[in-house]
Amino acid sequence: MDGSVYVGNAGVDGATNAGWLLGHFMPEGEVRHSTDVEVKWGVHPAGETRSRWATGERRTALLVLVDGRFRVELRDRTVVLGEPGDYVVWGPGVDHSWYAERESVVLTVRWPSVPGYRVAPPVIR
């Protein structure tokens, strides 16, 4: 391969980088390196929650439920994703957190891909 194609498995590849498959944090020169977008395959056991709220957000995010039941907490509302394909989008400046009500798989796309947002690993409540 010439490096312009990568074939993998989201569950396997994501397990080595907190679910992230594509973004600025992937090795430069690799096709999965991008400063334009980030993609995550999130596998969350029931009761798992974000370790702290995301604040000062400069990105736009799309979160799509693949399986399970997943709650996205926003400052002014709570969004429950309960059916495969349910999704929520929020823009820059929207503080957020999340909680897996049941074991869940979610696909997250954020743009642009910028450093400085890494937090402690999620916790089980």
Image (cartoon, rainbow, N blue to C red):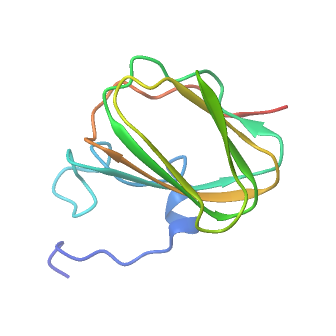
Coordinates of residue 76 in the picture (x, y in percent): 59, 23
In-image side of 101 versus 15 (left or right): right
Residue 121 visible here: no
Toward the viewer: 96 or 4? Answer: 96
Which quadrant is home to the C terminus?
top right
Q: Position of residue 11 (x, y in %)?
A: 58, 66
Say above or below: 103 vs 118: below
Q: Is residue 125 left or right of residue 113?
A: right
**Left or right relative to 69: residue 62:** left
7 and 70: which one is in front?
Answer: 70
Residue 103: name its quadrant: bottom right
Give the answer, above or below, for where 123 lies relative to 95.
below
* Residue 113 visible, this angle: yes
Residue 8 location (% of width, % of height): 43, 75
Find the residue positioned furthest to the front.
76
Residue that appears at 51% across and 68% down: 10
Q: Nearer the viewer, residue 95 or 17?
A: 95
Q: Residue at x 60, y 60 (%)?
A: 86
The residue under the point 82% across, 53% down is 102
The N terminus: image quadrant: bottom left
Q: Give the x, y percent position of residue 39.
A: 40, 55
Q: Which residue occupies the extreme bottom position in the image?
A: 1
Residue at 39% across / 17% down in the picture? 56
